[in-house]
Image (cartoon, rainbow, N blue to C red):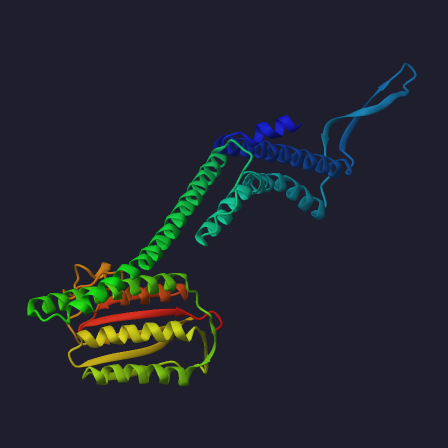
Amino acid sequence: MEKIKRSGQNLSLRRSLVLYVATFVLLALALSILTSSICDRAADRIWSSYPPSGEKYYLTNEQGEYLGEGTYIGRESAPLSERDEQRITLLELFPMLATPVYSALCILAAAFLFYRNRLKRPLAELREASEKIAKSDLDFSIAYDSKDELGELVASFEIMRTTLANNFSEMWRQVEERKALNAAFAHDLRTPLTVLKGYTEMLQTSEQIQTRETAATMGKHLSRMEAYIDSMSRLRRLEDTRPECKAVAVQPFLSSLEESARILCVQNGKTLYLQNEVSVPELFIDTEFVSQVCNNLIANAVRYARTSVTLNLALQERSLLLTVSDDGTGFDSNSLHRVTDPYFTEETDHAKHFGLGLYICRLLCEHHGGYLKLENSLTGAKVTACFNTPDL
């Protein structure tokens, strides 16, 4: 019995479907024949309840005595009652109606059993595996003990899962190695830079003008290298940082964001316009993440704005949207997709800006379950930072 069951599981889906349909078609045919036979017998019983009429003939012996019960010649049935006529009509009609009903029910039963026995389990396994992969959970295995088409699909899915898990492990190892290398690089460079700065300061006290000018140029480049090393260290810390969300009173927090933004705009001679569309009393967020993103976006906007910067705060479903727009020239359309890459900048002077501001904003938004969207509007650049607020 187990061997037969195993052979049935290994049949192709096409053959299995044909087998299910053929089996239930035969069942429908058998039910139709059985129903017709039962109705015929019931009709015969109704007819037999009425005595026949007509002339009856008997066999006689030499003495003229009847032999046997006799036989009707030209037998006529007695007229049926109205109720029995209706019964006979229904018994004749029922087999004709039952046949298509049996066929439909058997086809539905074949489809249901085929789905339950051959499709339900592997499809459920594949759906569950897809959901886990979508959540970046690869610590599982998927198996289906069959050699049919779905069994092959499940096996291929398991191979894909294993490959993804290996690739993610390798990628994670490389990322960690890169972080460790950057940390070691930043740490090891500090000592020689300190020594070079000391010699540069000594050279700047020289009596020769050319030597002092050369030392001053060296000092600028050394300061830039120090700033670059500091940015590498800060970037690694940010990559490892995760948000600590807590309930925050909305209006006081948004007022602090507005105050910081207004100070930056005033210092750079720009006008700040605020649009606050948040009406809830509390938000469940990490204020440090939101504040840092807001300050970076405002600082970036005031550098390129002509006269004004607009800060818009709104709620969308379960997210806080922080949008900063300016009336500047906007982003270069050819490099818009690269603006959030680390150390990418369109400026020619890299002494002060290393191209980390928008990358840091994107990093913090993604860690907070959101995203950073950059686009050009009709009046300039527009950047939207989204922060997921799960308990909103």
Q: Residue at x 41, y 66 (%)?
A: 368
Relative horizontal placement of residue 240, taking residue 81 as reference (left or right) = left
Q: Who is closer to the viewer here, 342 or 1?
A: 342
Q: Who is closer to the viewer here, 200 or 358?
A: 200
Residue lying at the far top of the rendered structure: 62
Q: Is residue 369 above or below residue 87?
A: below
Relative horizontal placement of residue 380, taking residue 66 as reference (left or right) = left
Residue 36 in view in this figure: yes
Residue 358: x and y in percent read 28, 66
Q: Who is closer to the viewer here, 327 or 3?
A: 327
Q: Residue at x 7, y 69 (%)?
A: 208
Q: Is residue 5 above or below residue 172?
A: above
- Quarter of the image where one finds residue 219: bottom left
Residue 339: x and y in percent read 23, 62
Q: Residue at x 11, y 69 (%)?
A: 212
Relative horizontal placement of residue 81, taking residue 120 as reference (left or right) = right
Q: Quadrant of the N terminus?
A: top right
